[in-house]
Amino acid sequence: MADVSDPKIEEAYQDVRSDKTETNWLLADYESDRSDKLLLTSTGTGGLDELRDQLDDNKASFAYVRVQYANDKESKREKFILVVWIGPGCKVMRKAKISVHTADVKQVLKTFSIEVPAREKDDLKSDPIVVKLRKAGGASYDGV
């Protein structure tokens, strides 16, 4: 089991979900290579581009992101995604535990439209994620 008891994770989750703040992502990393305790590492306002810069290729991490996109000229949507990051240099034992730990993380980072498994930073490019969000939302009027 993953220890997701750090109160800063819950605070950051509420901050990302709030319309009253600019914060649009949070990143939680393991305390150490041998620990199953997750700690809030960082938050930001620069969306997926800024988050990608924070990811460590040698770690596994969890991120929660608010993604904004336009359906047409008049409407904007905001959806939330859960990112499960497993860097290309992540240790084998950490990789093996991620699926079990993801269930624990979902107890805290509860509300999201899609889960995005990311193994490379390019997996977190905005355009393909917006396509997935449109499909998941069932309100895509442009044939996507």
Image (cartoon, rainbow, N blue to C red):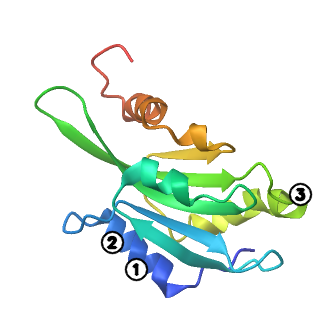
Q: Residues within 10 Å of mark 2 (few under 14, many from 20)?
A: some
73 w.r.t. 103: above or below: above
Image point (75%, 74%), residue name: 1
Q: Secondary structure at mark 1?
A: helix
Image point (80%, 57%), residue name: 90
Q: Secondary structure at mark 3?
A: helix
| Residue at image mark 2 | 15
What numbered label is drawn on residue 11? Answer: 1
| Residue at image mark 3 | 92
Whether residue 87 sits left or right of residue 15 in the image: it is right
Q: Secondary structure at mark 2?
A: helix
Q: Residue furthest left?
A: 74
> Which callout, 1 or 3, points at the residue further toward the start of the chain?
1
Q: CA distance from mark 1 to mark 3?
A: 31 Å
Q: Single out the mark in the foreground, 1 or 3.
A: 3
Residue type of the residue flagged with mark 1: Glu
Q: CA distance from mark 3 to mark 2?
A: 33 Å
> Which callout, 3 or 2, points at the residue further toward the start of the chain?
2
Whether residue 63 sits left or right of residue 136 in the image: it is right
Is residue 112 visible to the viewer in this orientation of the structure? no
Image point (63%, 71%), residue name: 29
